[in-house]
Image (tube, rainbow, N blue to C red):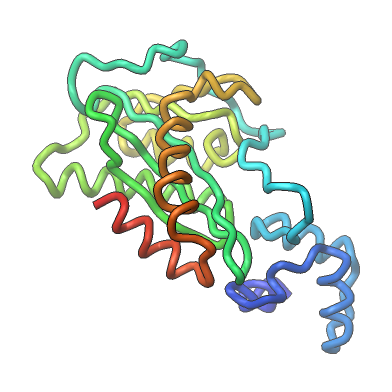
Amino acid sequence: MENVLRNLSGKPEQMYGRRTMTRYLRRHGHDVAFCTVDRIMRDLGHHGVVRGRRPRTTIPSKNGIRAADRLNRDFTAAAPDRVWVADFTYVSTLAGWAYVAFVFEVYSRAIVGWTVSSTKTTGLVSKALTTAVWRRDHHGHPVEPGLVFHSNAGSRYTSARFSESLALQGLTASAGSVGDAYDNALAKSIIRLFKTEVVSQHGPFTTLAEVEFAVMEWVD
């Protein structure tokens, strides 16, 4: 059943909510319970399009361990690659929501990592982190152990899987409080610029690929 829902990525059916999706699957011969569809969609980060509401990007984790806030709203750094901040946002397309994750270098305000996905899973933010580390190494500026990686307290950034990724790279985790935009103000400020210069100017987008291409051009 999980593979069936994965294969709907990029199709109009991806915008179905849990109840509509359950009825859709039953019409196509799948004897499935609502609770099963609800669990799988939640695991995949899928949700229906709801009029008047925007998807939540900062959802606190029930089981994740939140790191201390090592920045305390001080978004400055004495040298490059001492502090990174990260966040992700959403972009509406005709095929469903696209999620864009960024990693920003605090000293220069440069975008060092990014990725685009149709789901808002831990893999989304992990890939942005991996891209950032690879790009810095590729450009002759390998990341040194102890670099502070600051994010919000959302479940993707506080998950055990993402914490392990940070530890493997030798990075020091830092997280703001739940629901406080000021604790990650630098990342949110640059993302607002992305929404103004890309989403508002070049939308509406049709596919995930269009969003990805627009992000690449903007970052470049």
User: In the visual, does 29 lie left or right of 138?
Assistant: right
Frontmost residue, 113 versus 214: 214
Count of number-bearing discs: 0
User: Residue 73: x, y in percent?
Assistant: 45, 13
Given the current orientation, which residue lies at the most extreme front position? 201
Establish if 38 lies above or below 191: below
Q: Is residue 89 above or below residue 39?
A: above
Quarter of the image with the N terminus is bottom right
The structure residue drawn at horizontal position 60% and vertical position 60%, both measured from the top left corner, is 97
Relative to 33, is 125 on the left or the right?
left
Q: Quadrant of residue 165?
A: top left
State whether residue 163 is above or below residue 145: below
Residue located at (13% from left, 37% from top): 141
Q: Position of residue 212 (x, y in %)?
A: 40, 62
At 19% from the left and 26% from the top, the residue drawn is 80
Q: Indicate the position of residue 140 as horizontal and vertical percent values.
A: 9, 42
- Residue at horizontal 48 percent and vertical 32 percent from the top: 188
Q: Position of residue 162 (x, y in %)?
A: 48, 41
Quarter of image, res 136: top left
Residue 21 in the figure: left or right of residue 193: right
Q: Nearer the viewer, residue 112 or 160?
A: 112
Query: Can you name the residue that lies furthest to the bottom here?
Result: 29
- Residues 129 and 198: in front is 198
Quarter-of-image position of residue 156: top right
